[in-house]
Image (tube, grey):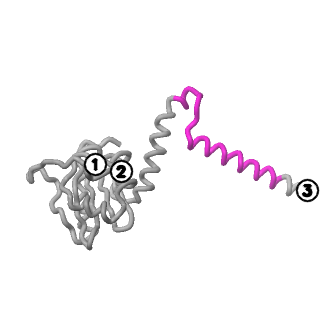
Amino acid sequence: MIVDSPVAISIFMRGIYTTKLCYSSGELNHTGALLFQHFHTNAQLSALAQMGDISTLNCTLSDCILHKRSEASNPLPSRSQTSKAEAIASGLSLPIHYLWDGKQWLVRYEGLVFETLRVALRREQIRLNEASTLPEINQGKKRSVATNCYQRNRKYDSHKRKKATTFLRR
């Protein structure tokens, strides 16, 4: 999923949600993966919450590029929210919203429902893997992971049915 507009990153620290914008590379397989892998300790999250808006998120905060913006171009109404509902509402106008709820990363993309970032990254990885094997499937050279799992389960089920039928006939 390629994102052309900024994405929101909301972080819950000390009873307040702080929302930042990330202006480039906001898609799940870049910004989402970096947040999930590298930003989960209180020190990292506190430092990220104190930063301004980000042009590009990197593995370490010292490598992040801060975004120079004017207040007129700010699509978010408020930067600090006291409740989770306010933090969620502040990022509704953006395509992707990452939210640290104090325990784990959540993400909202392709709709209005938040889900854990771990699940979203796994789904995106499966989608990308299946998309990369589609031309090969049409040529009959290679099957996708989902096709292989389906056929393996089908063989297992038919084996169980055959075994049960044999047992009943005796």
Mark 3 closeness class: few <14, some 14–19, many ≥20 residues within 10 Å:
few
Residue type highlighted by circle 1: Leu
Q: Is residue 97 left or right of residue 66?
A: right
Measure the C-alpha gap from mark 3 to mark 1.
Answer: 66 Å
Q: Which residue position is annotated with label 2?
A: 34
- Quadrant where the image shows the C terminus: bottom right
The quadrant holding residue 138 is top right
Q: Label 2: state its secondary structure.
A: helix
Q: Which tag, 2 or 1, sits closer to the chain's start?
A: 2
Residue type highlighted by circle 3: Arg
Residue 57: numbered disc? 1
Mark 1 closeness class: few <14, some 14–19, many ≥20 residues within 10 Å:
many
Reply above or below: 107 against 147. below
- Pointer 3 with pointer 1, Cβ within 8 A: no
* Mark in the foreground, 2 or 3: 2
Measure the C-alpha gap from mark 2 to mark 3.
Answer: 59 Å
- Pointer 2 with pointer 1, Cβ within 8 A: yes
Q: Residue at x 25, y 42 (%)?
A: 4
Q: Which tag, 3 or 1, sits closer to the chain's start?
A: 1
Residue type highlighted by circle 2: Leu
Q: Magenta residues?
A: 136-165
Looking at the picture, tell me which residue is in the foreground, 23 or 93.
Answer: 23
Q: Which residue position is annotated with label 3?
A: 170
Magenta part, dominant SS: helix
* Mark in the foreground, 3 or 1: 1
Looking at the picture, tell me which residue is in the foreground, 113 or 27.
Answer: 27
Is residue 15 found inside the magenta-colored segment of the image?
A: no
- Quadrant where the image shows the N terminus: top left
Q: Residue at x 21, y 68 (%)?
A: 81
